[in-house]
Image (tube, rainbow, N blue to C red):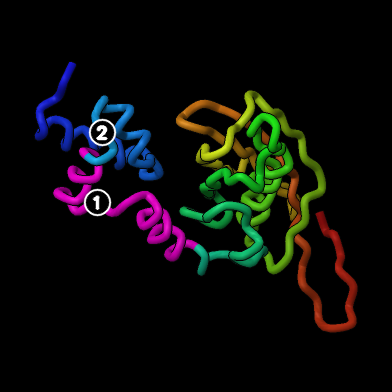
Amino acid sequence: MVLSRKNRRDNLVRLLSQDPFLADRQLAKEFAVSVATIRLDRMALDIPEVRERTKDMANKTYAKLKSIQGSEVIGELVDIEVGSHAISLLSVTEEMVFARNQIMRGHYLFAQGNSLAVALINSSMALTAKAQVRYFRPVKNEDRVIAKATLVSQEGHRYTIKVESRVLQELVFTGEFVVVAIDHKKEGDTYENRG
């Protein structure tokens, strides 16, 4: 079914409010129109391209980090509520995939999830004590992986965090990370795990 311009634009706004990380090519496929049509619709609606939307969201979130520096987060951090939840976006590039089949190396998915789990901790330093992960399907070059981390439980200085990573709403990776907050002591003191 072909939508009128007004209906397509209304649906475009609705879709981007649900998932602001959708690229023009994904939207074009969704609406069965050309990428150029989507670009024109976005411009008419004053909606920036996906890179700008992501960058704007990221700039607002990096200042909240405590246990990890922004440059240490794998992917772009687009939302975080320390001690609660976080979201990052990783665009798969040629350097991340195997040359012969264009499938992403698994350690990038792990690193994205692990760094997001550590970022949730409200401490000057946090380390991963344990991780249990599962891969569901291969991720390919040029895919965009959205990882969502949620704090599941806390016992003292030990935090259990669940991470789910998706490509186009399809689950590709899950991880349960146990992260330990380490109190930062004065110079010369040793770190003490109180969890």
- The picture places residue 75, in percent across and down from the top left corner, at 57, 52
Q: Is 54 colored magenta in this rendering? A: yes
**Disc 1 on helix, strand or loop?**
loop
> Along the horizontal axis of the image, is 182 left or right of 137?
right
Image quadrant containing the C terminus: bottom right
Residue 120 vs 134, above or below: the answer is below
When asked about the image quadrant of residue 191, the answer is: bottom right
User: What residue appears at the point 55 percent right and 57 percent down from the top-left corner?
Assistant: 82
Q: Name the residue under label 1.
A: 47
When asked about the image quadrant of residue 35, the answer is: top left
User: What residue appears at the point 42 percent right and 64 percent down from the top-left corner?
Assistant: 60
Label 2: few (<14), some or many (≥20) within 10 Å?
few
> What residue type is disc 1 on?
Ile
Q: Name the residue under label 2.
A: 34
Q: Which mark is residue 17?
A: none
Q: Is the magenta stretch mostly helix, strand or loop?
A: helix
Can you see residue 52?
A: yes
> What residue type is disc 2 on?
Ser
Image quadrant containing the N terminus: top left
Residue 100 vs 119, above or below: the answer is above
What is the span of residues highlighted in magenta in the rendered image? Answer: 37-61
Q: Is 40 colored magenta in this rendering? A: yes
Residue occupying the far front of the picture: 100
User: What residue appears at the point 16 percent right and 36 percent down from the top-left corner?
Assistant: 10
